[in-house]
């Protein structure tokens, strides 16, 4: 792996800022606080953030607030629009509605009823953002895998006709404990060779830090490409680490949130895993008495999950965050 320590340090600092923003959207996000978190002076932080992220700090915060609000409007159908607006950092329902319409072309209420579904349908096959169809598979345990489309770990793949057969009795609802993870983040489309190359880099990093010994690994997609432009979608390749472990370079440490998850064991082809995610959302979730929570969806790769290089078949545990309907 090429060694660019200064670039990796910048990446790690800005990733800390982006994670902080996502966890404090309802609060006032002061320039001084974010600059201090990145260990840059407030005087230079705006310019550095724009150069690294490609958008101003204010534009980024506004976009993330609207994207999170867009997801919560669909996932938390029982919450009033105003409550979601305030939870995402908007001062009033009027300012939220105005910003939301400017971003998504409809009111929050219309988005909740039909706009989100229409957006997903319009992006199927002819996305203005160039979203790829399919699923990217990865078997992080040994650095091998295949990438044939969008990551299954998005949990919200674009609509497809394929409905997979699944055993509803095999789905378990479990309360998972929080997990301390070291992760390497990638920003870009969930489809194409980028995810596979990212896992190769992450596996090299894990090997260099002695982190391959039977540890759980995770593929975590942080955005819904129906809402977030694929070029801005974030994906974490992650591994469970001990309390005393310190990350280096652009890798960082955070906590994967615990809580109630629907778990389903999968073994098959990468594209079949993507279909299984969609099938569980379409066929199982509406009858389960549960709804999506706004924690990330992810795939868990345990030592018992294998990867067959000759067939490209791999195993993982699909983890869907849920709460009572």
Image (tube, helix red, strand yellow):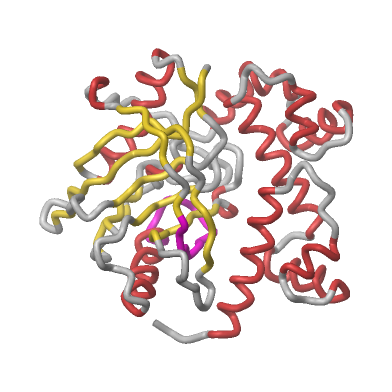
Q: Is residue 254 above or below residue 277?
A: below
Q: How many marks?
A: 0
Q: Quadrant of residue 231?
A: bottom right
Residue 232 placed where, x, y %? Answer: 59, 53
The stretch of residues the image draws in magenta is 180-194
**Relative to the observer, which residue lies in front, 203 or 156?**
203
Left or right of 256 in this view: 227: right
* Residue lying at the far front of the rendered structure: 244
Residue 256 placed where, x, y %? Answer: 49, 50
Pick the quarter of the image with the N terminus.
Answer: bottom left
Left or right of 44 in this view: 15: left
Q: Is residue 281 above or below residue 196?
A: above
Left or right of 98 in this view: 224: left
**Relative to the observer, which residue lies in front, 277 or 259?**
259
**Residue at x 52% of width, y 57% of height:** 188
Residue 163 placed where, x, y %? Answer: 29, 24
Residue 50 placed where, x, y %? Answer: 75, 66
Q: Quadrant of residue 279?
A: top left
**Residue at x 78% of width, y 31% of height:** 85
**Residue at x 85% of width, y 65% of height:** 32
Q: Quadrant of residue 18?
A: bottom right
**Relative to the observer, which residue lies in front, 253 or 224?**
253
**Relative to the observer, which residue lies in front, 54 or 121?**
54
Left or right of 229 in this view: 319: left
Q: Is residue 68 magenta?
A: no
Q: Is residue 188 magenta?
A: yes
**Residue at x 45% of width, y 59% of height:** 181
């Amino acid at each position: 792996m090429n060694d660019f320590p200064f670039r990796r340090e910048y990446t790690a600092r800005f990733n800390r800022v982006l994670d902080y923003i996502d966890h404090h959207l309802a609060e006032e996000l002061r320039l001084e606080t974010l600059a201090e978190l990145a260990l840059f002076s407030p005087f230079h932080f705006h310019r550095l953030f724009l150069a690294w992220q490609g958008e101003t700090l204010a534009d980024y915060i506004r976009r993330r607030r609207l994207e999170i609000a867009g997801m919560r409007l669909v996932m938390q159908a029982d919450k009033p629009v105003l409550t979601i607006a305030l939870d995402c950092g908007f001062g009033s329902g009027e300012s939220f509605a105005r910003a939301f319409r400017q971003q998504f072309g409809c009111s929050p209420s219309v988005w909740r009823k039909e706009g989100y579904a229409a957006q997903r349908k319009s992006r199927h096959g002819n996305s203005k953002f160039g979203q790829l169809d399919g699923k990217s598979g990865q078997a992080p345990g040994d650095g091998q895998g295949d990438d044939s489309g969008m990551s299954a770990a998005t949990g919200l793949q674009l609509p497809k006709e394929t409905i997979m057969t699944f055993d509803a009795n095999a789905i378990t609802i479990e309360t998972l404990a929080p997990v301390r993870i070291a992760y390497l983040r990638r920003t870009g489309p969930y489809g194409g060779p980028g995810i596979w190359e990212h896992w190769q880099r992450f596996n090299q990093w894990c090997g260099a830090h002695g982190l391959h010994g039977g540890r759980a690994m995770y593929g975590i997609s942080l955005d819904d490409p129906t809402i977030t432009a694929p070029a801005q979608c974030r994906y974490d390749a992650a591994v469970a680490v001990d309390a005393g472990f310190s990350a280096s370079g652009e890798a960082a440490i955070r906590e994967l949130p615990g809580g109630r998850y629907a778990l389903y064991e999968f073994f098959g082809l990468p594209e079949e895993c993507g279909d299984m995610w969609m099938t569980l959302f379409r066929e199982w979730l509406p009858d389960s008495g549960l709804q999506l929570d706004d924690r990330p969806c992810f795939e868990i790769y345990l030592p018992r999950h294998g990867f067959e290089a000759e067939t490209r078949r791999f195993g993982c545990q699909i983890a869907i965050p849920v709460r009572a309907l």
